[in-house]
Amino acid sequence: MIRYLYHETTEKETREIDKALICDSDLQALYNELYVMKKNMDAAQLEPSSSTVLNILSYARSVPQHKQ
């Protein structure tokens, strides 16, 4: 179902899932739940915390530079 949500199924798989969704209310409920979760994740504004950025910058400064 995850592959279906992300349009990663083959044409045959897509047709089979489409048919199954019409007939199976439990599968429809699962699809709807996963669809809402995917939509919410896609809309989320994600960025690292300030402390994470500072840790990365600190580490980058501590790594010796290679001169060529």
Image (spheres, grey):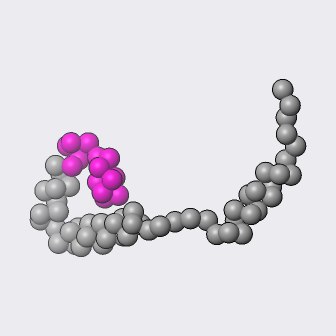
Q: Is residue 68 above or below residue 56?
A: above
Question: Is 18 part of what is drawn in magenta?
Answer: no
Q: Quadrant of residue 55?
A: bottom right
| Place of residue 5 in the rendered image (x, y in percent of width and height, measured from the top left) | 30, 57
Query: Which sits in the foreground, 24 or 41?
Result: 41
Identify the residue at the far top of this view: 68
* In the image, residue 37 above or below residue 7: below
Please state the extent of the stretch shown in magenta in the rendering.
1-14
In this rendered view, identify the residue nearer to me: 41 or 48.
48
In the rendered image, the vertical position of residue 59 relative to residue 51, given as above or below: above
Residue 1 in view, yes or no = yes
User: In front here: 12 or 41?
Assistant: 41
Q: Position of residue 52 (x, y in %)?
A: 70, 65
Q: Position of residue 35 (x, y in %)?
A: 30, 66
Q: Is residue 66 shown left or right of residue 29?
A: right
Q: Is residue 46 left or right of residue 21?
A: right
Is residue 57 shown left or right of residue 25? right
Total number of numbered labels? Answer: 0
- Seen at 31% across and 70% down, the residue is 36
Residue shown at 68% from the left, 69% from the top: 50
Residue closest to the eye, 32 or 26: 32
**Left or right: 12, with 7 as reference point:** left
* Quadrant showing the C terminus: top right
> Within the image, what quadrant is residue 22 found in?
bottom left
Q: Quadrant of the N terminus?
A: bottom left
At 20% across and 43% down in the image, what residue appears? 12
Q: Residue at x 72, y 69 (%)?
A: 51
